[in-house]
Amino acid sequence: MPTRINFRSLMKIGPVQIGTYRDRRGRSKDAAVCTADGCGWSSDYSSTTAAQLAARSHRCRVS
């Protein structure tokens, strides 16, 4: 059974939502996820700044 991830400090930049969570080893990580239908882009980062930069530079290929 997969571990449930609880996100903290959520923010949204355009269609991309960023959230902070703790991984299985207890380290703080940031996830950036595109919320546009059909896009499917997501990525994990070690800092909030990197996740924000990725959110600002993300371009959806979905029209």
Image (cartoon, grey):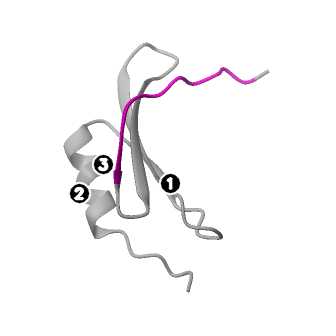
Residue tagged by mark 3?
Answer: 51
Residue tagged by mark 2?
Answer: 53
Sort mark 1 into few (<14), some (14-19) or many (20+) by Cα contacts within 10 Å: some
Amino acid type, mark 2:
Leu
Amino acid type, mark 3:
Ala
Asked where in the image residue 38 lies, by quadrant, the reply is bottom right
Of residues 22 and 17, which is closer to you in this image?
A: 17
Of residues 59 and 2, which is closer to you in this image?
A: 59
Amino acid type, mark 1:
Ser
* Residue 4 in the image, given as x and y percentages of width and height: 64, 22
Residue tagged by mark 1?
Answer: 42
Mark 2–mark 1 Cα distance, whole angstroms, equals: 13 Å
Of the numbered discs 2 and 1, the one sitting upstream in the chain is 1
Q: Residue at x 60, y 63 (%)?
A: 40
Mark 1–mark 3 Cα distance, whole angstroms, equals: 10 Å
* Residue 2 in the image, given as x and y percentages of width and height: 72, 24
Of residues 54 and 15, which is closer to you in this image?
A: 15
